[in-house]
Amino acid sequence: MSAGPPSSAQSGPCAEPTLSSARRRTHGSDGDFTRDFTRSEDRVTSWVTPTLIEEDGEVVVAMWGVPRISTTTVDRPRIRARLDGPEALVTVIGPAGYGKTVAVAQWAAEADAVGVWARVRDRDVDSAAFVQDLADELLASGTVSAASPLRHLGEAVMAGADPWEVLCRALRDAGDLVIVVDDVDRLTDSAVDGLIRLAEDLPRLRVRATARRRTRLTEPGLGLVLDTAVVTTDELALTDDEARAILGPGADRSTVERILEWGGSPLIARALASGSTTAEGRQQAADHAFSSLLDDRIRAEDWDPELVDFLARTSVADALTLELATALSPRTDAERMLARAEEEGLGLWTGSPSRGEQFRYSPPAREAFAQLLLERQRSAVRPLNLIAAGWEATHGQPFSALERAVRFSDWALATSVVRESWHVLLRNHGLQVRDLFTTVPLLTLRRLPLIAMILALIYNARRSHRLRALELFALANYGASRQSSTAQPADRALLAGVQTAALRVSGRIRPALAAAERTYDTLVSMSDEDRDRLGPNEPTLYNQAGTTFFYGGRSESALDSFARSTAVGDAKGLTAGMIGLAMTAGVHAVSGDMPEAASTVAEADIRDWPEGWLTGYSGSFYRVARAFLALESFDAAEADRHLRTLDPHRETIEHWPLLTHLDTLVLLLGGRPEEALLRLESTIRTQRRRQGSSPFTSERLQHTVALAHLAAGDAVAAERALAGTSEDARLAVSHARISLARGMPDDVLRRLQDGGSTSGSSRSRGEALALTAAALAVVGDDRAALTAGRATLAFLGERGLGLPLALVPRSALEALEKSLRRSGSPELAEALGPAKEHAVVAGGLTSIRLTPRELEVARRLPTHPTLGAIADDLSVSPNTVKTQLRSLYKKLDVTSRPEALARLAVLGVTAGQGRSDPPTHDRG
């Protein structure tokens, strides 16, 4: 898009000039605010449509984008008066040919108002696409500031933001504003409803619209909510004087009466004014529809065949630039031909700050010439439509281009459109794209992996369409694998990116990793020319590869990919690079590298994010990072606040296992283990139908389930939850935690002695160090516990971690605290205080049930050095004590007195206790 008007034109509506006293002039090619649009053939055309208002040396844009009205157009002040009223909504409704657009353009060109003109080009345009077009006009015209949230509207919509809410915020302080919507009936009902809500929310906004059929804007009940008015066909119909003015001097009464009898259509009157002057000719015209009348004019007048051919060929386009008109016709004088069409009343020149000057045939004229093309040059219909599609694809109209490509089965063009504009299609035309391909056979889609992928993403946005999405993901993967060996580097990267995303969301992580490697390797070895061919897709492909690496357990590769995404995004001004920044923060936090996570979050906080990205899928790992940062300082409420922003996306987001893990930690820190278990089970049961979790994420959840069971006091269920998980550092840590909770410190030391505290992520290492130090304290080795405790606290402090200590059973933390104090390190003992206060596992869990005699023997073990001493104290024989001790060791699962003493200490069975009930396992 060209740069906006100079700063003097950007004072906008906030300046609130007194428009009634301003001196108006129409913008011309020599004006100070000329907007030049350079086309591919290097022809420069000036922007001609906005009205400018000059006052006190200040010039501000008034109505921007108003179609240029011919100087021969008959003025109709009575219609202008209807449009100039105070109503919030005024709709001009009537059939084609009644001059709706002309009437509103006449009013807008003279109105004391600031605003923009927006035309709805396609059929069934939904909110996202329409608001995006409107935002383009508002930004380009300077009606809203360059810092408006509309600047990233597309990305915001991709993240789930309501486009109308973003627009409403952008216009909240815009002052008095008019928005004209030409062909509003081409909007979907939901988009019209959004327009109505906008008018409700902005008291200083006026909406003026044209329509060929009734819409929600014309419903009588709307008047109960807003001041509305409808200019009907009867009001649009020409009056006697207006008909005479069009017919010109010498108009006879019978012709005027006939025009009025036909309904007073200005288009018919204009056609008759330029047509046959004989009564017989006019009578003949009166008996035909407009297409027949036009055909009569072609035969009766000096319309040479070349003009007719030009009009027919160019009628395939909804709007024409000189570039497109020249491409559709072999003639080199397209400008002269379009000027002739304008003189004949067949269309209007319109302007758009974002699209430049375009000629638009009136609907009846376009339909008539399209029929003429079909009758005279049927074989040209397909190639001409594909020329138009190619132009639309490169001029910001991807859906129109895709629609033509599908209609004429040009799958190469359709794939090209999707490659270049998939993000726009997904954001603004999702449902339209879905409907466009409903009749395309699956066998065809199997050969079109990029198209199959975008369809899969569209279906995947709704949980009820998940199975259809998986089917399309499989088709995308199949097609990409078939084509990848023969494609160019840019296409190979795209196809591999399609594959890795499709395979990952389908749960096939091993082949997804292979595709991610191909994506990454192709990208890093690509030439600059191939990178240019990728367009805006490069950071997105790095993001897809990085996400697959992460869910394949390869965090370093993931971080490298995300860093490249951010670098490319920054270099090329592509917002997708900020997703890489968010992902980087989250991966660091998951791995337990909190200083890196915090610095990345700080960098993200100063970025100019699109609306809704930081509360949606695009910024989900930013929220993950913020939640972990809060949890490391035991602020569960703050972590929960960040997680709740993602609730609207939980049903479809692929990151749900990680978010569920964080939800569980929040509840456990809040002392609600039973609730955590219930939510875990419910989420897993609900999400099981997704059929798309990788082993990495599934195992992560198994460890989460085990932790929740342990916090709830069920060590047996905790062990059962870990069945089938991979032998790695995480498994060693989880089993060690269960053993320590059961009072088996030797088992903890055995499990973690083989590198458990030196392998895995920083988080796993921190948890292993904390468990080892606590286990040493429980066995009574104060010297070793001091060394391990000092190393643990140093490591956790350097990594900014607090959770690893809070996940140590409280009873073991207390033992470590006492051991550190005995060793003369009260400052280290005090450092354990916050973690002990927030410990999520109580400890002292066992399934042991001791008999009263076994309990008596157990209580004397710490203070009676021999069996005889215990026997004397209990007044029994040494053999009886030996039998009880053998049974006790078996139940404790130990083989020596020191092991038994350590286990009994954890269980709370110590000398001098007056406990009457034997220790039992709490809830299993």
Image (cartoon, helix red, strand yellow):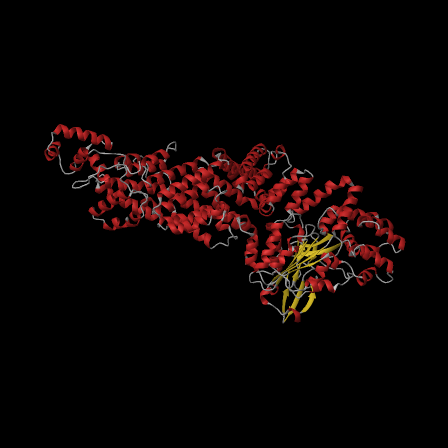
Estimate the x, y position of residue 445 in percent, counting from the top left: 61, 35
Q: Say if 792 sits above or below 260 in the image.
A: above
Q: Quadrant of residue 50?
A: bottom right
Estimate the x, y position of residue 895 in percent, counting from the top left: 22, 30
Q: Which residue sits at x=63%, y=38%?
A: 438
Residue nearest the viewer, comparing 51 with 709: 709
* Left/right of residue 133 with respect to residue 626 in the rendered view: right
Residue nearest the viewer, comparing 722 with 855: 855
Instruction: Quarter of the image for the N terminus: give it.
Output: bottom right
Estimate the x, y position of residue 898 in percent, counting from the top left: 20, 35
**Is residue 303 among the parts visible in the rendering?**
no
Count of marks overlaid on the render:
0
Estimate the x, y position of residue 453 in percent, counting from the top left: 57, 39
Q: Say if 321 sits above or below 524 in the image.
A: below
Q: Say if 114 sits above or below 547 in the image.
A: below
* Left/right of residue 47 with respect to residue 725 in the rendered view: right
Instruction: Quarter of the image for the C terminus: give it.
Output: top left
* Left/right of residue 477 with respect to residue 874 in the rendered view: right
Residue nearest the viewer, comparing 7 with 101: 101
**Is residue 828 among the parts visible in the rendering?**
yes
